[in-house]
Image (cartoon, helix red, strand yellow):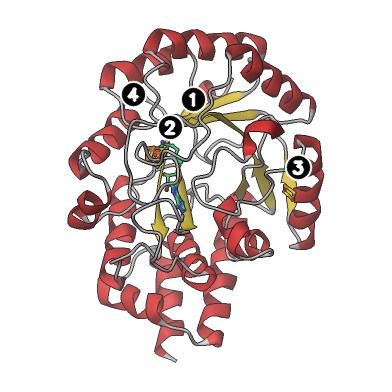
Amino acid sequence: MKELSYIDYLFERENLDDSKLGELIESNNPKVLEYLYGKSLEKKIKYYDKSIYMRGLLEFTNICKLNCKYCGLRWDNKNVDRYRLTEEQILDCCSTGYQLGYRTFVLQGGEDSYYTDDKLVKLITNIKSNYPAAAITLSIGEKAYESYKKYFNAGADRFLLRHETADKDLYNSLHPGSSYENRVRCLKDLKEIGYQIGAGFMTGLPGQTTKHLVKDLRFLKNLDPHMIGIGPFIPHSETPLANFSGGTVELTLKMVALTRLMIPKALLPSTTALGTIDSLGREKAIRAGANVVMPNLSPTNVREKYEIYENKICTGDEAAHCRQCIEKRINSTGSYVDMGRGDYVDWRTNNVY
Ligand code: SAM
Ligand code: SF4
Ligand code: FES
């Protein structure tokens, strides 16, 4: 079968022609898919063994001035009960997380102007001085170079900023008031400053074609980020995309596996969105080459309010419960939990602590 030889070629050379990538994306032959996931897992094990890294996610504000058409937190959605955690609440969550063994805290939020650079620098400095052994990951959207530099100097280690889609027209149609060029500028600035950067995209976006997905793989190959988040788009009823269908488990797993083979050393999260559309979605992604999970550390009383899409899993579960639940799930795949910082495999050792 020619698809199997494409996968072998991709496994060896870590690259493949666009048209062949397209054929693999469109294949629904179970033998091809099983082979693809197996080769992806083999590649992941080569660089990261059977370990799965854990990140503690803190959704610290659901206030957002932007209007991304897919997101339930968009400014125009007036049916969101908006919140922002205080610095004290954030530090409490870090304390709980640290006791549970987490050594990465991911601070994620909407583009909330309340959090000025000075406030963010103070927050980062404070977390870092309390937990010097933990990595801080930011996921707070598009900023100026100078702002990114300030957070880095204060101790932030990593930054997640999905590129969402590498097709300029599709990007601009989904992001009123924002531009593809600025998104890419941000990712390049972050890399130059010295962050471990995370890009990534959604599968099943309205208007997305195989060609767009090939563009995503090509974009990622050129950018060479340290992390790549891939999850299905899930429609939210209070957004302009409410009536579209979302991404599927199969397409998402294919893209995770192809990404592993194209950019083999990347940290690839098994996303909560995948766990939301399929109760075993996260396990399937781990079997297809993902190696990171991000359980939630936010206080349970705000979890439901961070509704980027509906029916999100884990909204009623305490951090300690998720910590145990996810470990069982990971073990069921034949992998194991690694509670270290979980840096990118080639990360400079002098940068680690
Ligand atoms: N505001 C920051 C940003 O946009 O980069 C970080 C928070 S944002 C909620 C994190 C990610 O959620 C986005 O990069 C996007 O890919 C994802 N997301 C938003 N709405 C979604 C939806 N309806 N379905 C799946 N993923 C979604
Ligand atoms: Fe805001 Fe991020 Fe949602 Fe866009 S995806 S509306 S920037 S929280
Ligand atoms: Fe949260 Fe299973 S990981 S309940």
Q: Residue at x 51, y 51 (%)?
A: 309
N-term mark: 3 or 2: 2
Does the numbered disc 3 mark a residue whose Cβ is under 8 Å from ligand 3?
A: yes
Could you tell me how far apart the alpha carbons at marks 4 and 3 are, in whole angstroms?
Answer: 37 Å
Kindly report which numbered mark, 1 or 3, lies closer to the viewer in this rendering: 3
**Looking at the image, which is closer to me, 124 or 300?**
300
N-term mark: 4 or 3: 4
Kind of element beneath mark 1 = loop
Instruction: Indicate the position of residue 274 as horizontal and vertical percent values.
Output: 57, 59
Instruction: Indicate the position of residue 23 as horizontal and vertical percent values.
Output: 34, 80
Could you tell me how far apart the alpha carbons at marks 1 and 3 are, in whole angstroms?
Answer: 28 Å
Give the amino acid at mark 2.
Answer: Gly
N-term mark: 4 or 2: 2
Q: Can you identify the residue that label 2 sits on?
A: 110
Q: Residue at x 54, y 69 (%)?
A: 249
**Looking at the image, which is closer to me, 103 or 95?**
95
Q: Can you identify the residue that label 1 sits on?
A: 157
Could you tell me how far apart the alpha carbons at marks 1 and 2 are, in whole angstroms?
Answer: 19 Å
Residue 352 lies, with reference to residue 250, above or below; the image says: above
Kindly report which numbered mark, 4 or 2, lies closer to the viewer in this rendering: 2
Q: Can you identify the residue that label 4 sits on?
A: 193
Kind of element beneath mark 3 = loop
Instruction: Indicate the position of residue 190 as horizontal and vertical percent values.
Output: 34, 29
Q: Can you identify the residue that label 3 sits on?
A: 317
- Estimate how packed mark 4 is, as few (under 14), some (14 to 19) or many (20 or more) residues with alpha carbons within 10 Å: some
- Seen in the image, is 150 located left or right of residue 35? left
